[in-house]
């Protein structure tokens, strides 16, 4: 048995916890998977490295509308893949080596662990680890629905799909969430024939209703979106590809594809940690229960010296949320008498598809409920990109900004953007919400560069009509 001052389960966001505060103390980092976790190896970073060249490929079709004829000659999948992963794998390996070999006070265990009591862990090979403080940053994993043929080698999740050797000619994507939307775009922009089987009547159903509705329409123009459609089975066919049986509104149909991407959500890795052995509370959806200080709970009470962060305990499976929680834990580990809470107000997110989507705060349905419950006068504005000069330059007909606000105070309740660079365009709105800036002051209390696309945000704020006072810039 080896005792540590700090043991961290998970080398994703958990890896950032080893601040200089721990220089002279014994630390264990434990990760049974690839060093660096999901975002670096199989998540945010490689996906966006595929999305960017996909945007370049898609821009040829856009350019034609504006009188510029371009052609995508070829997408060199293997070259793109190898460029992406030669960079990523080197970062992962460099991080692993640094932790494993270059820090005297840090020990890296490259295996899975589980709890045997609140401060005792057992590794897969039977090593015992105890620690004064343990941080669980064990992340989440993809869920595979129980469908005949789901174990075929042509069936992938986001964990494996980016490493395949060839760009598949025909892809079936199961699901209509983040991963489906991003990979649907990547594969279709690269030239694959994409079919998307979606259980419900719309893509991105967790988004604001206007976004979900308009994105479903935009996606349907790019690839074959089959709504109200279930995947019944998969089987290898005579020529080595996969025959999928789909059940949709028109009945049962068969589809031959070369690759199937399952994108049906992710579950926290809590179950694999044996939380019951340590008496830890687990939320109904499988997350490890924590309080606002990221302390793990047992019987509703915080367990001294036990913390969790990121996908294993958080409601939002997003890297910027895991990062914020890691900063909370890094502080709280060394300041037990001055605990900080994680703020989950106004958590933004973006879907890097085509069009891009970004959102923060309440959806329209949520805002209506909130306004009703709080006697609030809700105002809403939808401003099209195409109503601004930059939108004219782009001949844009799909992009829009939707804002929801309290008419009396002008405080924004929600912001939703679909279109070119939505993930960047939304940042001033996130800032306004985080710092309590009202819509009218935001619109008229600063300059907006003309004729930048940000004018669509300015105009959306003005359209809300929240504040009669003149808040114009004074010389
Ligand atoms: C395809 C994809 C794209 C994404 N894109 C974005 C994006 O654009 N923006 C965004 O904000 N978020 C994105 N996300 C989500 C983001 O990647 C996650 O929210 C984030 O990486 C979670 O970080 P974490 O530290 O909680 O867990 P992870 O980074 O997953 O780290 C957990 C680590 O714990 C290890 N582990 C698990 N169980 C054990 C155990 N029992 N013993 C030892 N080790 C264990 C795992 O091997 C893993 O390395 C994406 C996710 C996916 C899958
Ligand atoms: N840009 C980003 O920030 C980004 C990108 C990718 C992933 N992520 C994170 O990773 C998480 C996982 O992504 P995801 O797309 O797998 O999940 P998701 O929750 O976004 O979408 C899951 C989809 O699968 C459908 N579904 C669930 N079970 C099904 C079943 N049995 N049969 C058919 N359809 C089923 C759901 O209705 C939904 O459409 C996301 O929730 C997000 O937090 C973030």
Image: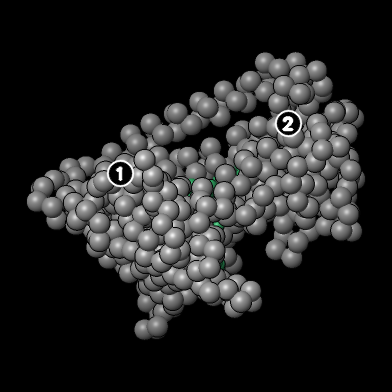
Label placed on residue 348: none
Report x, y in % for residue 4. Answer: 85, 28
SS for tag 1?
loop
Along the line of sight, the residue nearer the viewer: 298 or 422: 422
**Residue found farthest to the bottom:** 250
Q: Is residue 419 above or below residue 206?
A: above
Label 2: few (<14), some (14–19) or many (≥20) C-alpha neighbours in 10 Å:
many
Residue under label 2: 29
Q: Residue at x 53, y 74 (%)?
A: 377
Q: Residue at x 78, y 52 (%)?
A: 291
Report x, y in % for residue 123. Answer: 79, 38
Color scheme of the displayed model: one colour
Report x, y in % for residue 451. Answer: 24, 47
Q: Is residue 207 above or below residue 279?
A: below
Q: Residue at x 44, y 69 (%)?
A: 380
Q: Quadrant of ligand 1?
A: top right
Report whether 219 appears left or right of 283: left
Label placed on residue 449: 1
Q: Quadrant of the N terminus?
A: top right
Q: Taking the image as drawn, is residue 320 in sight?
A: yes
Q: CA distance from mark 2 to mark 1?
A: 48 Å
Do residues under tags 2 and 1 come within 8 Å of each other at their CB atoms?
no
Report x, y in % for residue 316. Answer: 61, 55
Q: Taking the image as drawn, is residue 112 in sight?
A: no
């Amino acid at each position: 048995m080896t005792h540590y001052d700090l043991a961290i389960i998970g080398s994703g966001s958990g890896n950032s916890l080893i601040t200089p505060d721990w220089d002279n103390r014994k630390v264990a980092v434990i990760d049974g998977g690839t060093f660096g976790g999901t975002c670096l190896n199989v998540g945010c970073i490689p996906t966006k490295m595929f999305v960017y060249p996909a945007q370049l490929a898609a821009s040829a079709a856009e350019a034609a509308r504006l009188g510029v004829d371009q052609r995508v000659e070829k997408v060199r999948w293997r070259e793109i893949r190898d460029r992406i992963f030669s960079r990523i794998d080197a970062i992962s390996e460099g991080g692993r080596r640094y932790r494993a070999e270059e820090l005297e006070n840090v020990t890296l265990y490259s295996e899975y662990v589980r709890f045997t009591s609140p401060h005792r862990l057992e590794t897969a090979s039977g090593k015992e680890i105890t620690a004064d403080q343990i941080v669980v940053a064990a992340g989440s994993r993809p869920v595979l629905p129980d469908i005949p043929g789901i174990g075929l080698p042509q069936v992938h999740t986001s964990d494996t799909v980016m490493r395949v050797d060839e760009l598949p000619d025909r892809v079936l994507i199961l699901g209509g969430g983040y991963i489906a939307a991003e990979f649907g775009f990547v594969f279709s922009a690269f030239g694959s024939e994409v079919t998307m089987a979606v259980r419900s009547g719309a893509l991105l159903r967790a988004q604001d209703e206007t976004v979900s509705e308009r994105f479903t329409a935009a996606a349907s123009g790019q690839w074959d979106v089959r709504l109200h459609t279930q995947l019944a089975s998969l089987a290898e066919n005579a020529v080595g590809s996969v025959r999928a049986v789909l059940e949709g509104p028109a009945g049962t149909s068969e589809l031959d594809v070369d690759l199937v991407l399952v994108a049906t959500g992710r579950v926290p890795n809590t179950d694999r940690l044996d939380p019951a052995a340590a008496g830890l509370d687990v939320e109904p959806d499988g997350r490890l229960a924590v309080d606002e200080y990221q302390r793990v709970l047992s019987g509703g009470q915080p367990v001294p010296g036990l913390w969790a962060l990121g996908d294993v305990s958080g409601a939002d499976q997003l890297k910027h949320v895991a990062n914020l929680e890691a900063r909370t834990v890094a502080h709280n580990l060394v300041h037990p008498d001055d605990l900080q809470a994680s703020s989950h107000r106004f958590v933004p997110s973006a879907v890097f598809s085509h069009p891009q989507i970004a959102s923060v705060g309440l959806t329209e349905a949520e805002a209506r409920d909130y306004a009703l419950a709080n006697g609030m006068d809700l105002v809403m504005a939808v401003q099209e990109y195409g109503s601004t000069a930059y939108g004219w330059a782009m001949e844009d007909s799909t992009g829009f900004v939707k804002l929801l606000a309290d008419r009396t105070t002008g405080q924004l309740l929600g912001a939703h953007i679909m279109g070119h660079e939505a993930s960047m365009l939304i940042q001033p709105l996130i800032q306004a919400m985080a710092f309590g800036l009202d819509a009218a002051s935001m619109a008229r209390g600063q300059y907006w560069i003309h004729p930048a696309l940000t004018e669509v945000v300015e105009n959306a704020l003005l359209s809300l009509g929240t504040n009669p006072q003149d808040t114009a810039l004074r010389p």
